[in-house]
Image (cartoon, rainbow, N blue to C red):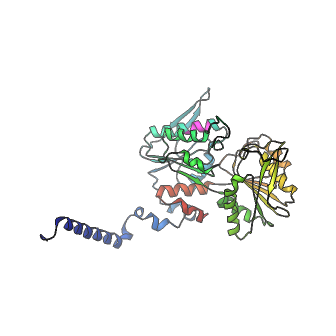
């Protein structure tokens, strides 16, 4: 051995030691703690396919909290994961200020905070910022904000000179108070993910094909056509259409877009309220077809109403609509839906149902299983890319 150069000897000894260690690990693989091998046991499973008692959740490390805007949804997620909701007090002072007080120790814990920033948007946003700040000051190790509906998401670019890009400002505020990761559902535009720095990963979950498509498979549709309410929503609609095709339902594609009284397409109106004096132009064939209008947000309901009327004039049969986020800010939303030819408006529960929205045409589907699966995968280090194959 003295004739062998010292460096070569060190390399050889290191290789022999490494091989011996790996051989020991492989031989005793079944005897090692399960956390050492999460991908082998769980890479092809999702949280909904396992009894809650078998979920490999470190309940000493994971803490699940809810803001006041998403208490029902958060409780459903907690029930699926079989973890308790964290204890905190959210109070409102007489002048409108928000007070936050944690009621348990979260030092060194991984926090998952569920809070939609829907109406009243400013109140819920400020509450979210203060919740994150309070948890950061309480020495939380990692804070993941689960924001099912991302408020200000429609202000994602300048439409006129000197306009604000509020979605980018919200992203900067969240990073400033100490958020580590953001999870949202069907962001209005994918570019919002780029408003956060590279140090803050953003997961944009899509539910159009995962949640809504199975619902409409059961509707016994006749020559179905999926209709987008703008040219910018074609990518979202295509994923929904592809899922229906995979389910054996051959589906067509069309889209409608607002025009003025002269039939000219109105620029910059893809994401805002359609006025009563405006009309819509249809691109595609819907005659003798069951149509599904697909959009990401229903606010006043004027766009859905006008789109339904437009395709009905072109000979459509049954008309449905599905929207991820039901803001439903219009106090007369029930009357708007009753006056439209829509048979059903299907929404997810990313936002609470307003008290004034009592129409029998409105149906809600739950995103709690999707969020529970997402939190579970992030917690144990599984990729989210496999989720589309599970739902």
Position of residue 326 relative to residue 166, above or below, is: below
In the displayed structure image, the side of residue 112 where residue 279 appears, left or right: right
Given residues 267 and 300, the one toward you in this image is 267
Span shown in magenta: 123-128
Q: Is residue 323 visible?
A: no
Residue 48 pos. (x, y %): 58, 62
Residue found at the very far top of the displayed protein? 95
Is residue 367 left or right of 3 when viewed as pictured? right
Q: Is residue 337 above or below residue 377?
A: above
- Count of labels shown? 0
Decide which of 4, 47 is in the foreground and name it. Answer: 4
Q: In the rendered image, is residue 244 in sight?
A: yes
Q: Position of residue 140 (x, y in %)?
A: 44, 43
Q: Pick the quarter of the image with the N terminus.
A: bottom left
The answer to which image quadrant residue 123 occupies is top right
Question: Seen in the image, is 312 located left or right of residue 240?
Answer: right
What secondary structure is the magenta-colored segment mainly? helix
Comparing 390 with 290, the one in front is 290
128 and 35: which one is in front? Answer: 128
- The answer to if 127 sits in the magenta stretch is yes
* Quadrant of the image containing the C terminus: bottom right
Percent of width and height locating residue 377: 51, 58
Q: Is residue 360 magenta?
A: no
Coordinates of residue 39 in the picture (x, y in percent): 46, 65
Q: Residue at x 31, y 71 (%)?
A: 24
Q: Residue at x 52, y 52 (%)?
A: 83
Residue furthest left in the image: 2
């Amino acid at each position: 051995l003295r004739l062998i150069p010292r460096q070569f000897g060190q390399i050889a000894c290191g290789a022999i030691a490494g091989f011996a260690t790996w051989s020991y690990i492989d031989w005793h693989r079944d005897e090692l703690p399960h956390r050492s091998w999460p991908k082998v046991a769980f890479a092809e499973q999702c949280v909904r396919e396992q009894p809650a008692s078998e979920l490999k959740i470190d309940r000493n490390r994971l803490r699940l909290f809810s803001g006041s805007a998403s208490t029902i949804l958060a409780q459903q997620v907690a029930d699926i994961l079989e973890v308790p909701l964290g204890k905190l007090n959210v109070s409102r002072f007489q002048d409108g200020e928000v007070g936050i007080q944690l009621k348990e120790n979260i030092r060194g814990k991984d926090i998952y905070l569920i809070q939609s920033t829907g109406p009243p948007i400013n109140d819920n946003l400020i509450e979210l910022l203060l919740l994150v700040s309070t948890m950061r000051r309480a020495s939380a190790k990692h804070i993941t904000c689960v924001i099912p509906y991302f408020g200000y998401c429609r202000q994602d670019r300048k439409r006129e000179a000197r306009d604000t890009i509020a979605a980018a400002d919200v992203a900067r505020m969240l990073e400033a108070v100490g958020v580590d990761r953001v999870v949202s559902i069907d962001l209005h535009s994918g570019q919002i993910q780029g408003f956060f720095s590279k140090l803050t990963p953003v997961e944009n979950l899509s539910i159009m094909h995962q949640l809504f498509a199975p619902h409409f498979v059961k509707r016994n549709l006749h020559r179905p056509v999926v209709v987008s309410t703008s040219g910018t929503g074609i990518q979202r609609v295509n994923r929904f259409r592809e899922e229906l095709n995979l389910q054996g339902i051959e589906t067509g594609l069309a889209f409608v877009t607002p025009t003025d009284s002269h039939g000219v397409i109105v620029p910059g109106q893809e994401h805002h309220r359609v006025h009563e004096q405006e009309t819509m132009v249809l691109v595609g064939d819907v005659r003798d077809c069951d149509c599904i209008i697909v959009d990401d947000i229903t606010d006043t309901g004027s766009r859905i109403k006008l789109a339904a009327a437009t395709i009905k004039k072109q000979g459509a049969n049954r008309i449905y609509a599905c929207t991820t986020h039901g803001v439903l800010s219009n106090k007369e939303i029930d009357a708007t839906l009753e006056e439209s030819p829509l048979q059903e408006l299907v929404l997810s529960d990313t936002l609470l149902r307003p008290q004034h929205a009592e129409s029998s045409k409105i149906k809600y589907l739950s995103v709690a299983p999707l969020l529970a699966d997402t939190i579970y995968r992030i917690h144990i280090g599984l990729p989210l890319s496999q989720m589309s194959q599970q739902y």
